[in-house]
Amino acid sequence: MYLGIDLGTSGVKAILIDADQRLIGEAASQPLSVARPQKGWSEQDPDLWWGAVCETLDALRLRQPKAMAAVQGIGLSGQMYGATLLDAADRPLRPAILWNDTRSGAECRDLLERVPELGGIVGRKPTPGVTAAKLIWVARHEPEVFAATRMVLLPKDYIRLRLSGERASDMADSSGTMWLDLGRRDWSDRMLDATGLRRDQMPRLHEGTEVTGRLRRDLAARWGMAGQPVIAGGGGDNACGACGAGVIGEGAGTLSLGTSGVLFVANASPRPAGQMAIETLCHAVPDVWHQMSVVLSATSCLTWLSARLKRSPKELVEALGPDPRPPTDLLFAPFLDGCWSPRNDPEIRGAFIGLAHQHDDAALTQAVLQGVAFALRECAEAFRASGTRLERLMAIGGGSQSALWLSMLATALEVELDLPEASELGAAFGAARLAMIAATGAAPPEVLRRPKIRAVVAPSAEHAASYAGAYEDWAGLTRLC
């Protein structure tokens, strides 16, 4: 058996798969809260993550005791970019600064001034989400915390530390920090020095398929495991989602609809995107890289609307029905957390544009879904401008359960969307697959196979022209937000 753990922004998911990659069990934690003490800030207490992991694995042991006893490998996936600062005793010094925190715009400019050649090292220009800029902010505004920092870990790697006692990370997640030399797949002393850090404050680097340690004996006993399973390097949630979807070959891609919306395309070599705010990162498997573009607020926009209308997101979406619709005249800018890619505008915020008396709950809901689709279309246009072809993508994440939303996305992006089985488990499934590779030594292509496709969503020919026109209106008007 193999266990995949996915630490998301809103909660923890864990799944068990057997040697044939069949889903044996799953569990999820209670929702995790995000603190927003100031405009643009987004923080979480790392110990909330650990509590959620324990809650989830405790539940799995109760439901699947025999399967848990047979676990041989554990894979970790998680939200990327979060700055988790630890003292000499491995205790968090402050709440973790999350991926969608936009406070460090000035620090991004500083980093570019300090290292003008950074694009050739890390493959992109800095944006406020990246970990390196967060540490410059901490050094400037919380110097006592910076001085006490002995280790900087990404969120899932803090869970690794609690599980195994090992300070380790993987190439895919670490390449998002802007401290990794993308071509060499190693820490860059130049980038570390630019942020006042040293290699001994960084975790050991591993490929996502490699063993980083073993589960502590006391935790193995708590969860009824017969031995001490190995813990794989794993990866950031997007790389693990791609592993779950078998997206490791040149040109293969995913569209992930979770708290954030992500376009992801695998590449056989690093492909920096120049002036575009598109990330070029290592993949979770050796000798593979990928391009990625992130819309910071995707399903979180629907969650926000749900709280205002006092109706669940599911109820709001289901009220629209599953059939393709023409675009609504009510436009929505989904920049509740700013815009990371491709505009790189941390100050922009969301808005409804064209709001009138006739716009009811249904119109507001459709506008939100459509706004996210158009923001992802903007990302797709940046990919195409960099020379990447997008013809079909695999849709994963919780938002991919909405037939209407998928129709909007396929039409807006002008691509076919493949829907894999168990798409909502993409990142956790990918982490479990990486655990299988680490535990067995199997070749990645043998394990990271493309899953069965349960449906294909094609662009709506009927609405293609109207969506193209609505997108042009959206792109022009949202630049005024």
Image (spheres, helix red, strand yellow):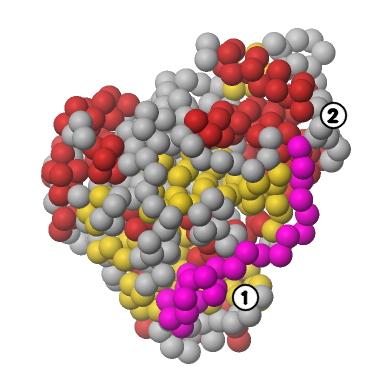
Q: Residue furthest bottom?
A: 226
Residue at horizontal 76 percent and vertical 37 percent from the top: 459
Under circle 2, the secondary element is loop
Is disc 1 surrounded by few (<14), some (14 to 19) or many (20+) residues within 10 Å? some
Along the viewing direction, whichever of 324 and 251 lies nearer the viewer: 251
Q: Which residue is mark 2?
A: 462
Horizontal and vertical percent for residue 400? 69, 47
Under circle 1, the secondary element is loop
Report the disc number at residue 21. Answer: 1
* Residue kind at label 1, given as amino acid type: Gln
Instruction: Read off the magenta span.
Output: 432-459
In the image, residue 301 above or below residue 176: above
Q: Give yes or no for residue 12 being in the magenta stretch.
A: no
Image quarter of the N terminus: bottom right
Horizontal and vertical percent for residue 243? 53, 61
Side (left or right) of 388 relative to 23: left
Side (left or right) of 85 relative to 48: left
Q: Give yes or no for residue 438 being in the magenta stretch.
A: yes
Residue at horizontal 80 percent and vertical 34 percent from the top: 460
Along the viewing direction, whichever of 312 and 415 lies nearer the viewer: 415
Q: Where on the picture, by quarter, is residue 209? A: bottom left
Q: Where on the picture, by quarter, is residue 308? A: top right
Is disc 2 surrounded by few (<14), some (14 to 19) or many (20+) residues within 10 Å? few
Of label 1 and label 2, which has the lower sequence position?
Answer: 1
Marks 1/2: CA distance? 39 Å
In the image, residue 245 above or below residue 389: below
Residue at horizontal 47 percent and vertical 60 percent from the top: 77
